[in-house]
Image (cartoon, helix red, strand yellow):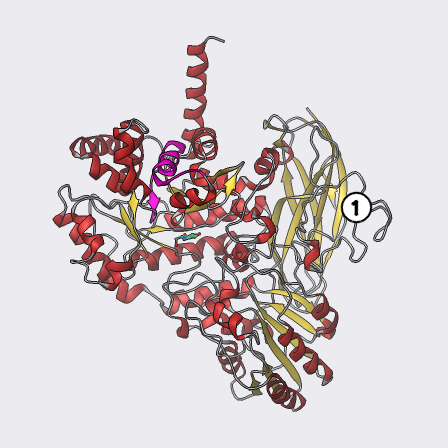
């Protein structure tokens, strides 16, 4: 093939990808940006690439601050972390009235799971397996944020992670690339709606590109290293899906990929994101990620800024590398004018897409801010969503749902804590407005039952650790009484009660950014409290608050029931009470594996088989297993109980041999054999039994959440096509291969009905 033809083909391929992934080229926008850039000085162009944090703008007088000076000089592209429509209006006014070219600023914030009305943390949200609800939660977050001045959110976080030690698993959708991709798409649709120019939609920023969830040992900001095969088959899908859904921006990650920090990684940003996936939006670094590349060992600020620009970064978050070095680098011939122009163009295009040039104040309508935040309607939506995120892990003797009568002891460090209910990333929330479990339960029982309450113990008894887990103002209300005094008080009320609810787990700030844990057990003092409560002989229902899978083997063996309620947001207490008292039948299913112990990590359902898998079960000498723990998780991916019992019939395929583009249906009868109406998420997994590269023992390929009345049976049917068989082979070509496949359907990734099919080209 001659060079010209090859070039034509690569352009044509890139063009066709971008046509499917991103909206068509907008000629009016192109003309507008071209004309504007024709008037811009080099400093003004570099200024558009600079994203400072609010700091002095918020604390000082907007007009006299250092940042305001830069804004007047046209040397700021946007600002992150300013809150309220009024403040944003003031700053925007400086930009559009006092800078030479009157270019409006973008305002971005971490609107991760709600703005003022907080929804469940993303990990919890994913456990609803309800894409409509997830989209609605992002829609409401966008409505509220845009009413209060924001036009850009640093969400969704789509990093796949298999390591619960990493605190940021709370911000993502768990371990599965297929589910993660659907959720990424739902969130982008929710934020961006059908028209970014509307004043109630905001631009999404997919993060963190890429592989941040695979940091070694789950230690925050740590190194990542993996094969390209694994990247493409197991980690990339949600980022790609987000691009295909039209995400306006992408954020780089802190970690390195293949020995090059993501913010300076040309292969990632230019080859994969832009050329292979056709991403047409702009790329912003994570917070100070450019100067951090010096710490990684790539050179001084000028050098790393050059690397970032050339790799494909358009905007420098807080790092000031672009602002302070690009001019010099241009003079020295280290970067080109067209590289700076390209980045500037992409930032200006984002502003154009948001409609900021038509009306820079379109997101700062103070009337909207007064009327549209934390409304009753939004709180109702948050409550309903929160009930769907709860996962019932254990329910012996059908202790749940509880009766609204008698005496109930509510015990634990998280029983009466409003501020922690929102979990991580709730920067615009008024924490004390959230509903605690105590308030929710009191509201639910009214005068028909008595609730006794005791704290029982602290979240942690180590005061130094306690201050590390309440840095951002979500108090743990550390109690200075001795552990035995507090436990004794709790045991005393337990003895007077018919049932005990133990509200245990983590404080909100024990997950999220820079909240890695090397031990994912319940803190020892909480375990002690639980043991003492169980020793009373009363039934004990553990209600867990946590932002990651925990290691709960002992609790699972001993507690009467376990309710996983994560951090459910503003309406947490009400939502938990809805489930505890049976107003809502829980239906959440885990999206991350819960290990038996920390040594099993990484433990995930879609693992490979190895050459020596277990045949008879643990323990087998010279097979892949541990001496001291089986390979099984405590709770598998997809697991979650309800108050009903669902039984599955035989799995049937429309044919057991297929050719080419045939569509095969897989159907199964699901029966609600319990006493309560309920919802069940029916999951379909696939195993490619022999291929040119090793394939996971199972991969999620479809699911349906169905409602079944008590006693009702429904036939659930899935359509399978060759698209479900595809994977990246060792040439990184996405295709399928003829052979045998196992199709599995069930209510979680472990308990499945299975059949085989032979599918040939
Ligand atoms: C750092 C975090 O990694 C990122 O997720 C967040 O969006 C930025 N800070 C901005 O707050």
Residue located 19% across and 59% down the image: 62
Picture coordinates of residue 493, whole percent (x, y):
62, 89
Q: Is residue 701 visible?
A: yes
Q: Secondary structure at mark 1?
A: loop
Look at 71% across and 83% down and name the residue there.
538
Query: Compared to 683, does 347 lie above or below?
Result: above
x, y percent for residue 438? 52, 80
Look at the image and tell me whether residue 26 can be seen: no
* 348 within the magenta span: no
Q: Quick one: quadrant of the C terminus?
A: top right
- Number of marks in picture: 1
Magenta segment: 298-318
Q: Label 1: how many residues lie within 10 Å, few (<14), some (14-19) or many (20+)?
A: some
What residue is pinned by disc 1? 624
Query: Does residue 128 appear to the left or right of 694 in the view shown?
Result: left
As rendered, which of 94 and 190 lies closer to the eye? 94
Give percent across and percent down for residue 113. Answer: 44, 58
Dividing the picture into quadrants, the one containing residue 251 is: top left
Magenta-span inclusion, residue 311: yes
Left or right: where does residue 467 sit relative to residue 325? right
Q: Is mark 1 within 8 Å of ligand 1?
A: no
Q: Quadrant of residue 430?
A: bottom left
Work out whether 387 lies above or below 482.
above
């Amino acid at each position: 093939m001659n060079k010209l033809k090859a070039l034509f083909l690569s352009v044509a391929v890139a063009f066709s990808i971008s046509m499917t992934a991103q909206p068509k080229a907008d000629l009016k926008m192109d003309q507008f940006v071209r004309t504007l850039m024709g008037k811009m000085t080099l400093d003004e162009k570099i200024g558009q690439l600079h994203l400072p944090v609010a700091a002095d703008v918020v604390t000082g007088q907007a007009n006299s601050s250092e940042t305001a000076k830069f804004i007047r000089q046209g040397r700021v592209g946007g600002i992150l972390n300013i809150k309220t429509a009024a403040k944003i209006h003031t700053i925007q006014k400086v930009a559009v009235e006092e800078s030479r070219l009157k270019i409006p600023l973008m305002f971005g914030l971490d609107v991760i799971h709600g703005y003022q009305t907080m929804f469940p943390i993303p990990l919890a949200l994913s456990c609803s397996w309800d894409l409509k609800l997830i989209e609605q939660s992002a829609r409401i977050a966008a409505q509220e944020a845009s009413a209060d001045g924001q036009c850009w959110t640093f969400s969704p976080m789509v990093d796949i992670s298999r390591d619960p030690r990493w605190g940021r698993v709370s911000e993502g959708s768990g371990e599965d690339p297929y589910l993660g991709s659907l959720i990424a798409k739902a969130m982008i649709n929710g934020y961006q709606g059908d028209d970014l120019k509307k004043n109630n939609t905001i631009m999404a920023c997919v993060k963190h590109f890429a592989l941040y969830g695979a940091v070694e040992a789950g230690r925050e900001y740590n190194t990542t290293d993996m094969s390209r095969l694994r990247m493409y088959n197991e980690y990339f899908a949600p980022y790609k899906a987000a691009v295909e859904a039209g995400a306006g921006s992408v954020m780089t990650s802190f970690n390195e990929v293949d020995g090059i920090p993501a913010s300076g990684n040309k292969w990632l940003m230019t080859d994969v994101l832009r050329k292979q996936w056709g991403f047409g939006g702009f790329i912003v670094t994570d917070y100070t990620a450019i100067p951090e590349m010096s710490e990684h060992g790539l050179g001084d600020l000028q050098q790393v800024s050059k690397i970032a620009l050339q790799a494909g970064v358009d905007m420098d978050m807080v790092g000031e590398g672009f602002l302070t070095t690009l001019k010099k680098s241009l003079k020295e011939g280290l970067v080109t004018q067209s590289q700076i122009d390209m980045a500037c163009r992409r930032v200006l295009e984002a502003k154009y897409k948001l409609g900021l040039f038509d009306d820079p104040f379109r997101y700062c309508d103070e009337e909207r801010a007064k009327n549209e935040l934390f409304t009753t309607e939004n709180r109702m939506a948050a409550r309903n969503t929160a009930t769907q995120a709860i996962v019932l892990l254990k329910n012996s003797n059908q202790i749940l749902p509880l009766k609204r009568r008698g005496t109930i002891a509510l015990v634990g460090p998280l029983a009466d804590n409003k501020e922690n209910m929102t979990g991580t990333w709730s920067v615009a929330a008024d924490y004390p407005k959230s509903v605690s479990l105590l308030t929710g339960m009191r509201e639910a029982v009214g005068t028909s039952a008595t609730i006794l309450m005791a704290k029982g113990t602290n979240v942690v008894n180590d005061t130094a650790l306690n201050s590390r887990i309440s840095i951002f103002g979500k108090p743990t209300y550390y109690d200075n009484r001795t552990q035995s005094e507090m436990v004794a008080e709790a045991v005393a009320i337990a003895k007077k009660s018919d049932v005990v609810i133990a509200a245990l787990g983590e404080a909100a700030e024990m997950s999220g950014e820079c909240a890695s844990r090397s031990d994912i057990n319940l803190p020892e003092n909480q375990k002690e409290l639980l043991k003492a409560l169980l020793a009373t002989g009363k039934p004990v229902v553990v209600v867990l608050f946590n932002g990651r899978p925990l290691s709960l083997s002992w609790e699972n063996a001993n507690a009467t029931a376990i309710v996983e309620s994560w951090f459910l947001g503003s309406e947490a207490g009400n939502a938990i009470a809805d489930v505890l008292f049976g107003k809502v039948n829980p239906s959440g299913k885990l999206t991350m594996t819960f290990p038996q112990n920390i040594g099993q990590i990484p433990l995930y359902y879609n693992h490979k088989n190895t050459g020596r898998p277990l045949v008879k079960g643990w323990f087998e000498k010279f097979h892949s297993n541990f001496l001291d723990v089986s390979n099984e998780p405590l709770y598998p991916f997809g697991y979650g109980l309800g108050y009903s019992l669902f039984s599955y019939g035989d799995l049937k395929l429309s044919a057991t041999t297929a050719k080419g583009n045939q569509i095969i249906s897989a159907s199964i009868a699901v029966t609600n054999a319990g006493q309560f109406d309920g919802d069940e998420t029916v999951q379909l997994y696939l195993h490619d039994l022999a291929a040119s590269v090793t394939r996971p023992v199972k991969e999620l390929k479809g699911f349906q959440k169905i409602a079944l009345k008590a006693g009702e049976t429904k036939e659930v049917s899935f359509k399978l096509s060759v698209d479900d068989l595809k994977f990246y082979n060792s040439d990184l070509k996405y295709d399928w291969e003829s052979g045998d496949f196992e199709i599995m359907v069930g209510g979680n990734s472990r308990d499945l009905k299975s059949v085989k099919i032979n599918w040939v080209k």
